[in-house]
Image: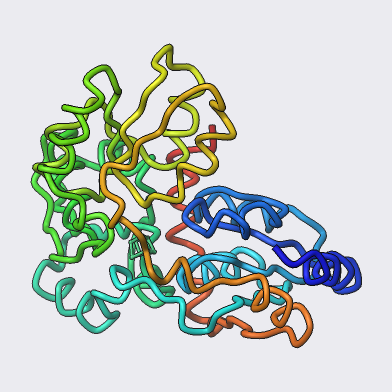
Amino acid sequence: MNQRILNEIQDLKAKRNAVILAHNYQPAGIQDLADFCGDSLGLSVQASKTTADVIVFCGVRFMAETAKILSPDKTVVMPDRWAGCPMADMITAEQLCGLKQKYPDALVVCYVNSTAEVKARSDYCCTSANAVELVNSLPRDKQIIFVPDQHLGKFVEERTGRDLILWPGYCPTHVFIGEDDIRRARQVHPSAVVMAHPECSELVKRLADVLLSTGQMLKFVKDSPATEFIVATEIEIIHPLKKVRPDAEFIPASTRAVCPNMKKTTVEKVLASLESLQYEVTVPEEIRLKAKKSLERMVEILPEK
Ligand code: SF4
């Protein structure tokens, strides 16, 4: 990595009073230069607690939007303007409104991987770590619309025993992982623990030993006596996993599980974002306030642990 660019980033970061956040799926070099690494909501909450004026969010658009929703007075920039999340874009606010018209009495739960407009039209937001708990806390006699990830939704259905009204969204990166990938990896590493993300397909999840969000994976390996883990999620999570358990071996279930949008961030773009405060992410105030409500309702019924 170019040391001159890294030095310039540090200088500008101090000058701008900026904080750099990197999602667990960002390239390893970006994670290493960030002030905080983690999952999308955790990062946004952390950033809202800092006294920084500028947040450089190395991730995808909905994550930067979430940071802006929670930190309206900070300037939020993302190094690559085109880093979007195909799953978040699989449902528009209009499509969600159509669904709400069809099921007027249903509560709407949206996965945090959704646009600010969709969050604004939802009753509750959830993460992959707390979706089961959140749905379990809602009145049993209420129908629930769950968007946009059908695979996380089916996982919630299975764990809660409730029928949800699902939207057919999915993460293209996670569905790349096939059941044959898990079987092959298990053959080579018979004593490994298979960890899969709830965004994986149902067939993959059925073959896994544990189903965990990225944050939960980091905690799980820390306390696990196992020394080999097959990892069924975006492959870059292996970088922080190795930091937690340097003695363990982490095997990607599929080397094709790469999110191209997460890989759009480069150190050059991080530097440019600090130099020119680009690309600024804004959320109209009316949308921001409503979206914030759905996040706050989640925290109200599931206080941070
Ligand atoms: S890994 Fe999937 S859900 Fe995450 S940003 Fe990429 S496309 Fe979206």
Nearer to us in this view, 169 or 180: 180
Q: Where on the picture, by quarter, is residue 158?
A: top left
Is the C terminus in the top left, top right, bottom left or bottom right quadrant? Answer: top right
- Left or right: 33 in relation to 238: right
Q: How many labels does the image show?
A: 0
Q: Residue at x 31, y 60 (%)?
A: 110
Position in image of residue 159 (x %, y %)? 18, 33
Say if 290 sits above or below 247 in the image: below
- Left or right: 30 in relation to 122: right
- Left or right: 296 in relation to 121: right
Single out the residue that lies furthest toward the top: 225
Say if 57 sits above or below 246 in the image: below
Q: Which residue is drawn at 48% across and 62% down?
A: 293
Say if 138 sits above or below 122 in the image: above
Q: Which residue is drawn at 66% across and 66% down?
A: 71
Position in image of residue 231 (x %, y %)? 33, 38
Q: Where on the picture, by quarter, is residue 73?
A: bottom right
Position in image of residue 257 (x %, y %)? 30, 55
Position in image of residue 49 (x %, y %)? 72, 53
The structure's colour scheme is rainbow
Q: Where on the picture, by quarter, is residue 232?
A: top left
Q: Which residue is drawn at 43% across and 49% down?
A: 298
The quarter of the rendering in which ligand 1 is drawn is bottom left
Say if 152 sits above or below 244 in the image: below
